[in-house]
């Protein structure tokens, strides 16, 4: 189970960087939150599978390895469309 405080920290970092010039990814979130990479990956996995974030799946050796992460917000369109959603068949 994902710790709600860890999820809040990860979402806060995503919120700060999602529209910046620098891509928001696993490594950036590790650095900004101070959380270990396993915890960040678990939180991102949960947020992605519950459709709270969108991102581009990359070959980064992490599960999931996401790039260009953004929050999914009711008042805005998805930037990445179906490509940014979690798909169980991957």
Image (cartoon, rainbow, N blue to C red):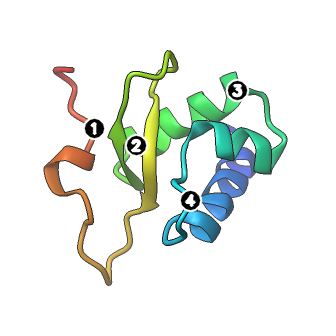
User: Mark 3 packing: few (<14 Cα in 10 Å), some, or many (20+)?
Assistant: some
Rounded to the nearest angstrom, the CA distance separating label 2 from label 1 is 6 Å
Q: Is residue 20 visible?
A: yes
User: Mark 1 packing: few (<14 Cα in 10 Å), some, or many (20+)?
Assistant: many
Helix, strand or loop at label 3? It is: helix
Front-most of residues 64 and 21: 21
Q: Which mark is residue 22?
A: 4
Location of residue 52 in the rendering, given as x and y in whole percent from the top left corner: 41, 55
Extreme-right residue of the structure: 34
Rounded to the nearest angstrom, the CA distance separating label 1 from label 4 is 22 Å
Rounded to the nearest angstrom, the CA distance separating label 2 from label 3 is 16 Å
Front-most of residues 60 and 9: 60
Instruction: Identify residue for label 3.
Output: 37
Q: Earlier in the sequence, mark 4 or mark 2?
A: 4
Q: Circles 4 and 2: CB distance less than 8 Å?
A: no
Location of residue 62 in the rendering, given as x and y in whole percent from the top left corner: 52, 20
Location of residue 8 in the rendering, given as x and y in whole percent from the top left corner: 68, 57
Q: Earlier in the sequence, mark 1 or mark 3?
A: 3
Q: Residue at x 50, y 15 (%)?
A: 61
Rounded to the nearest angstrom, the CA distance separating label 4 from label 3 is 19 Å
Quadrant containing the N terminus is top right
Position above or below: 88 against 51: above
81 on left or right of 4: left
Instruction: Identify residue for label 2.
Output: 48
Q: Circles 2 and 1: CB distance less than 8 Å?
A: yes
Q: Circles 1 and 3: CB distance less than 8 Å?
A: no
Instruction: Identify residue for label 1.
Output: 86
Q: Residue at x 53, y 67 (%)?
A: 21
Quadrant containing the C terminus is top left
Q: Residue at x 39, y 22 (%)?
A: 59
Rounded to the nearest angstrom, the CA distance separating label 1 from label 3 is 20 Å
């Amino acid at each position: 189970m994902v710790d709600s405080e860890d999820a809040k920290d990860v979402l806060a970092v995503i919120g700060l960087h999602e529209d910046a010039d620098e891509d928001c990814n696993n490594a950036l979130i590790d650095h900004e939150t101070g959380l270990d990479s396993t915890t960040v990956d678990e939180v991102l996995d949960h947020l992605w599978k519950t459709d709270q974030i969108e991102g581009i799946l990359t070959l980064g050796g992490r599960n999931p390895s996401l790039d260009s992460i953004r929050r999914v917000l009711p008042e805005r369109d998805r930037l990445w469309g179906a490509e940014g959603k979690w798909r169980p068949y991957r």
